[in-house]
Amino acid sequence: MIKYKLKCQSSYCTEQKGFDGWFQNIETFEKQLDSGLINCPLCGSENISKLLTTPSLKKIQNTNKKITKNKIQKNAFRNKKLENIATILRSIKNEIKKNSTFVGDDFVNQARSMNQGQIKEKSIYGHGTKKEIDELRDEGVDVLNIPWITEDH
């Protein structure tokens, strides 16, 4: 497996750090990227680029650490909790996509227009900077910021 550092190029995520993606090989990465299967975990954009990465070398150490049954159970529980959270966030994402309209970078303008009664209210989702979202909240617009995680393939 190869780990690549990826970066979202959307205007919403310009100040965000990159994220990691694991792929079988470079061909698999390129095929998934071309097919639109790779998207930003924060905003859902498919405008993703691969950053320069250094090879990861495993350092061999001769340590005789004891792994207790308790430690194994704690780690398993922690991983299970994270899996459950990811499943819940994926379900929320699917419901939003099914029942709302994607407006992309025009989210802030449309949300503000709906709040002011200039356009008909409807369920929308899209992108906005932290500052823009905070401004909407200050204006009394009910906005939720939900982590947009990738599908589990």
Image (cartoon, rainbow, N blue to C red):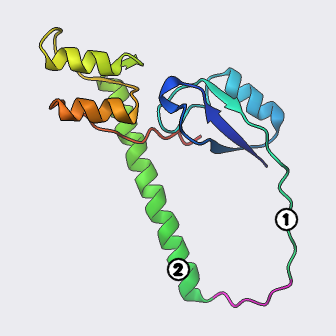
Residue in front for this viewpoint, 78 or 12: 12
* 81 w.r.t. 29: above or below: below
- Give the numbered dot on residue 152: none
The magenta segment: 62-67
Residue 97 place in picture, x, y as percent: 37, 26
The answer to whether residue 7 is above or below residue 97 is below
Question: Residue 21, position in %: x, y?
Answer: 67, 43
- The image quadrant of residue 24 is top right
In the rendered structure, find residue 73 and report the number of the disc placed on it: 2
Q: Residue at left 43%, top 49%? A: 87
Tell me residue 132's x, y (percent).
33, 29
Give the crowd class for mark 1: few <14, some 14-19, many >=20 residues within 10 Å.
few
Q: Quadrant of residue 52?
A: top right
Tell me if residue 96 is in the magenta stretch.
no
Q: Position of residue 65 (x, y in %)?
A: 73, 89
Hey, which residue is sitting farthest left in the picture? 117
Residue that carries the numbered disc 1 in the rendered image: 58
64 magenta-colored = yes
For the question of whether residue 101 can be seen, the reply is: no
Instruction: Give the residue drawn at x 60%, y 23%.
Output: 47
**Label 2: how many Cα within 10 Å (few below 14, some 14–19, many 20+):** few
Viewed as shown, does residue 153 lie left or right of 28?
Answer: left
* Amino acid residing under circle 1: Lys
